[in-house]
Image: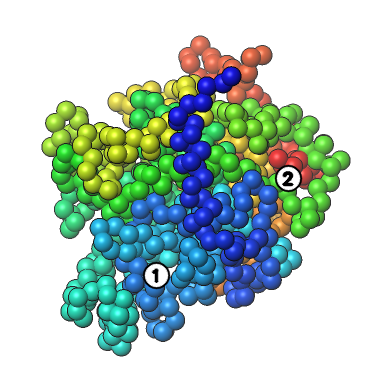
Amino acid sequence: MKKIHIISIVTALFSTSCTYTSQGLLVNDRRNAEASNEVFFGDSVKEISYLEQNWSRYDSLWFYNTTQGSDLIPYSIFLNLEQPGSTELFRSERNMQKLRFLTQKPSFDNPDGLPIGFVKDSYQGKDYMGFTCAACHTNQINYKGVGVRIDGAPALSDIESLLINLTASVEATLADSDKLARLTEHVLAEGDTESEQAFKRELEEILVERQRYDRRNAPVHPNNGNINVPYGYGRLDAFGRIYNRIFSHLVKPEVDNYNPANAPVSYPFLWDSPYSDFVQWNGVGDNYPGKRLGFLGPLNRNVGEVLGVFAIFDLKEKGDIGYLSSAVQHNLTRLEYQLNSLQSPQWPDHILPAINTELAAKGKQLFYQYQCDACHTSSAKFDRADPDRIMVVQHTSVNLLQTDPTMAMNALTRTGDSGYFGDVKGAGFEAKTSALQALQYATTEVVKEPDHDKNIIRRGLEHAADFLFAKQTNPFKKPTQRQVNFETIPVDADAKTVAYSLNVYRGRALNGIWATAPYLHNGSVLNLYELFLPRCSDAEIEAGKKCRSNKFTVGSREFDPEKVGFVSKDKAQYPELYEFDTSLPSNSNAGHEYAAGVTRMIKRNKQGIAVRDEEGGFQLEEPFPAMDSAQRKALVEYLKTL
């Protein structure tokens, strides 16, 4: 007879106690989705459909509506704030859909009908609007009037514009007495301020804070004439903004301590993330809950994430209870566990055209012929529903991939004033510190005497279940060996192996890859078909060479099932679309051109281990023959099956 461990009982109760009952009992199959009636980019839909991903309607809504402690702006202000030059609310369905957030109908756990990923959080007696994980990791593709919502998929939302427009709305309200009077009346009625004067002062403070944030995180490129390259739809420099929030909290509010957040990347998909040894694009932190990069792995990673998305926290002084923060570790642990059951989406042939199985079989042969499996795990090698699956990803040097290096290099080289951390005895901080070191210290600080509801990382009996649960449910009980193909070229003269080995990008698993356009880490390739074409000059494209698009638009949800990606629509017809220009800094669409006969594979021995030369460098294969159109179509067809 098997022993029943108390932690197993706790796990079962912990995972189910709130998932179902907190969302109400009457939830439809559409999970309270609001179909888009506004035709912004010619992609409105009449109905919403969900795919089978092993989540019930209640699981999805719990994921959408569970706070992680993000506190962007007071809730009553967000509910009633108007847009500049209009009385239309900032949170209006029209505005949210234009920014490509997924709108929801009012429901039991979302009474104000906030979009997916927007949630009320209460901290120290005040209510705020903040973001959940779902804001960046839920998406919808539209095809012939049907909107297919996919949990865990990279969002198409434009968070940069949302934040900039929010600042503009606050500024416009303070400049317009009528707007200010209307907003004040609502806030007073909800009891969120003592007086008109007190509220105006609060709103002025919010404006100053928002303006500082927008300026510090502007995606400018100092080495390219300070050109500003907006992220557009479906991208965010999350690392840059997390680092800047840490740095800004290490000094006085009026002191600048930041780096431009100029390396936007596509949001990673979330299915299989608990089963992957590394989840970030550059593999900066592993999922093993050991002592190498943090006590609890995923929990530390998620705490860092919520600090970046507007958790309230203070790094000025550490008391007996640690650095205070609104980050809710209890929910972060439960959110991570919730992902254990999420499965990758499978091609919906009841909505999209059926897969050509004969063509897909040819594509599978090409997949292995071109050694795609050397860097990318495919669902042919594991069961998407296997609770014991372990997915060890391959990291490859940016210099070998030849893709845009901005994100990887920023993560390695960003530094700032260590500020308050410089006074911490025994922590090893100098006047300047790396962003990674500051983030790690902030999120792994041991706290011995927890007597406050929320602080960055807690220790002690009161919250022991959080940490036991996080360790027990993490698939990685033992550390995995990092699978890295990196060149032995230091980033700088004093770089150590651990530093330059992070000048890599991971080869992500490919199950569900069809639902994650645009492609490459920075979203610079429009669809899967173009991923197997070479990068070319404008002149080559004009001469008729088949190449990746150097310019395309992003924002439309209309899906192209043949090439597998979103349709690039005419910006002249839809001027609010984002034009992705691959000639701009951080937007390069170069690299990963194996199928185009450009990028060379690393030689491997019979055991699959990379072969080095006498000087320690990699031996490279001759480039593969460039695929023709029929081969590219076959490979795309195979990838639909994963």
The residue located at (70%, 64%) in the rendering is: 146
Does 289 appear above or below 516? above
In the rendered view, how is the structure colored?
A: rainbow
| Badge 2 amino acid | Lys
Estimate the x, y position of residue 611 in percent, counting from the top left.
57, 16
Q: Earlier in the sequence, mark 1 or mark 2?
A: 1
Location of mark 1 (residue): 165
Determine which of the numbered discs, if any, sits on residue 12 in the image.
Answer: none
The residue located at (76%, 58%) in the rendering is: 351
Q: Report the front residue among 477 and 625.
A: 477
Location of mark 2 (residue): 640
| Mark 2 element type | helix
| Mark 1 element type | helix
| Circle 1 Cα neighbour tier, 10 Å, few/some/many (<14 / 14–19 / ≥20) | some
| Badge 1 amino acid | Asn
The quadrant holding residue 102 is bottom right
The residue located at (53%, 43%) in the rendering is: 339
The image quadrant where one finds the N terminus is top right
Q: Report the front residue among 551 and 341.
A: 341
Estimate the x, y position of residue 221 in percent, counting from the top left.
37, 52
The residue located at (77%, 44%) in the rendering is: 637
Name the residue furthest right: 358
The image quadrant where one finds the C terminus is top right
Does 71 appear above or below 507? below
Task: Count the numbered circles shown.
Answer: 2
